[in-house]
Image: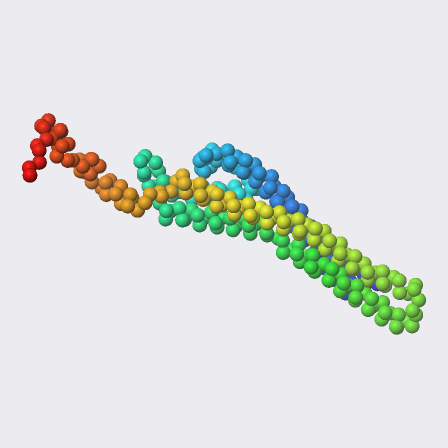
Amino acid sequence: MLGNTQEGLCTIVALLIVSIFSWTVIITKGRQLIRARKMGRRFFEAYRQTKDPLELARRGEQFDGAPAYELYATGAEELDYHLQHNPVEIRGQTRISSGSFETVRVAIERSAATEALSLEKGMIILSTAVAGGPFIGLFGTVWGVMETFSGIGIANAASLTAMAPGVAAALLATVAGLSVAIPAMFAYNYMVTTIRAITQELDAFASEFATQMEHRYVDNRPLAEEIRDALRGALPEPVRREVSHPSTPATLAARDGAAPQPARV
């Protein structure tokens, strides 16, 4: 019988190991994805109710397990760093330069990629179980049938009583292989679909979050206006007032209390 041979024992042990790894991934990854969807909905509901992109971070709210929140926390932390260390003051408002914002954007994209990889971690085990389980079982089946016919040839007895136990044991390997592959197949299809949806949700939120931060905290003034404001800030106060409000003969005369003189032809 298959279970009594070394080859059959190796087949059953291999399928058992694959099954243990497969079910471990199914349970842990299933819990992770369920929590990610649940906490993700809570995070998006809270975020949609805010007007300031940094409001949730400043309130200290946390949504552990939501991939979108991890992306948000990374972007908010990077933006807050530049607001404190590389600020740009514009009419009493603190903003950051376009160069600093590119650093924030890179941090957001890196966090999105990290979360996507975390969601996909372990899926290779399920795909291996789906593809390899039936073949391992088939290997055991073929080997068991070979052993059965070899025994019949040696014993010179082709009765059903002699063949049935060996064939049944050989087919047991096929059943074991399918028992490993079928649950892994259903779990893999469900999880791949869920991961794809969460990943697309992450990409959309990364673009939305970056756009809102750019509108609220990035210095988007034209270059000419930036140069003018920089020069104006470097001038003394009297000269700055003169540049802002240039004097004309009429204004000078009015300031000195004298009537303006008519222009000579």
Which residue corresponds to the image point at 72% horizontal and 55% vertical from the top-left?
A: 181
Estimate the x, y position of residue 88 in percent, counting from the top left: 33, 41
Q: Is residue 6 visible?
A: no
Q: Quadrant of the N terminus?
A: bottom right
- Comparing 260 with 94, the one in front is 260
Which residue corresponds to the image point at 75% horizontal and 54% vertical from the top-left?
A: 179
Q: Quadrant of the C terminus?
A: top left
Which residue corresponds to the image point at 26% horizontal and 41% vertical from the top-left?
A: 229
The type of colouring in the image is: rainbow
Estimate the x, y position of residue 122 in percent, counting from the top left: 62, 53
Q: Is residue 226 above or below residue 8?
A: above
Which residue corresponds to the image point at 70% horizontal and 51% vertical from the top-left?
A: 186
Q: Is residue 111 visible?
A: yes
Q: Is residue 116 above or below residue 3?
A: above
Residue extending farthest left: 264
**Residue 181 placement, left or right of 98:** right
- Comparing 155 with 87, the one in front is 87
Estimate the x, y position of residue 71 in percent, counting from the top left: 50, 44
